[in-house]
Amino acid sequence: MEDYTARTRALLGDEAIDRLQDSRVLVFGLGGVGGIAVEALARSGVGCLGLVDFDTIDPTNINRQIIALETTIGQKKTDVMRERIKAIHPRIETIVFFERLTPENIDLFHLEDWDYIVDAIDDVCAKLVLIEEADRLGLSLISCMGAGNHLSPTGFKIADIKDTHTCPLARTIRQEASKRGIKQLKTVFNAKPPDKKRASLSDQPAVPASIMMGVGAAGLLLAAEVIRELSLSTKNPGPLT
């Protein structure tokens, strides 16, 4: 059987694939953004993936989450994602945390043991807990800002938090990061206004509307930047352009 990384190897080279297969990436949040990011990381050759989520699959997830099917409703997202990774390639190691991140359990995830951390959390408090701890430890982390209320994928960009704009979540994180003395934070954010102002589920005003094209683009950008950084020999390459 031909190596599943053959086409990626042709693009990145043997040394890059070796680095990826030796890498460990921890992903917080397996929803529309995080699920796509994990899928791309697995298919790109990352050797070990940590999966963090406390939720089960709901029928409303089907429109945008890659692990959400009629046959997976009610199952733990971590379990379904682990089985999907195993189906992509059985040699990829997966470590599952069916947990909600809190200030009290942050040590459970042993952040210092991972080469890269992906923040696809949609809860501001948990997001800030992760960002602050990763900054304190000097770890590589990329954080996704708001991906809801966008149909078009074309507005998503990679930028440091200080250079974000337009996105309400990015504004909140930018302010809170400044209060905490965080100097740098790589993000994926959308530079365009939402397609429908203040769009939300009609019966749940606090829940943003979303579709796969928007959240999927954000997830792919997260994964692309992680793959680019891990596959390069330089410690701090510039952002993906």
Image (spheres, grey):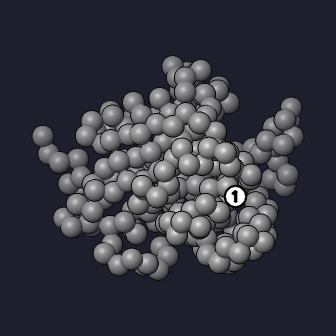
Please tell me in which quadrant of the rendered image residue 186 appears: bottom right
Q: Is residue 167 left or right of residue 84?
A: right
Q: Is residue 124 left or right of residue 65?
A: right
Q: Secondary structure at mark 1?
A: helix
> Is any part of residue 51 visible from this angle?
yes
User: Residue type at mark 1?
Assistant: Leu
In front: 216, or 119? 119
Residue 126: percent from the left, percent from the top?
69, 50
Q: Residue at x 64, y 26 (%)?
A: 58
Label 1 crowd (10 A; few <14 / some 14-19 / many >=20)? some
In the image, residue 159 above or below residue 22: below
Please tell me in which quadrant of the rendered image residue 176 appears: bottom right
Q: Is residue 151 left or right of residue 234?
A: right
Q: Residue at x 59, y 36 (%)?
A: 99
In front: 15, or 205? 15
Q: Residue at x 58, y 55 (%)?
A: 119
Residue tagged by mark 1?
128
Q: Residue at x 20, y 54 (%)?
A: 6
> Is any part of residue 164 visible from this angle?
no
Q: Is residue 193 left or right of residue 60?
A: right
Residue 23: percent from the left, percent from the top?
33, 57
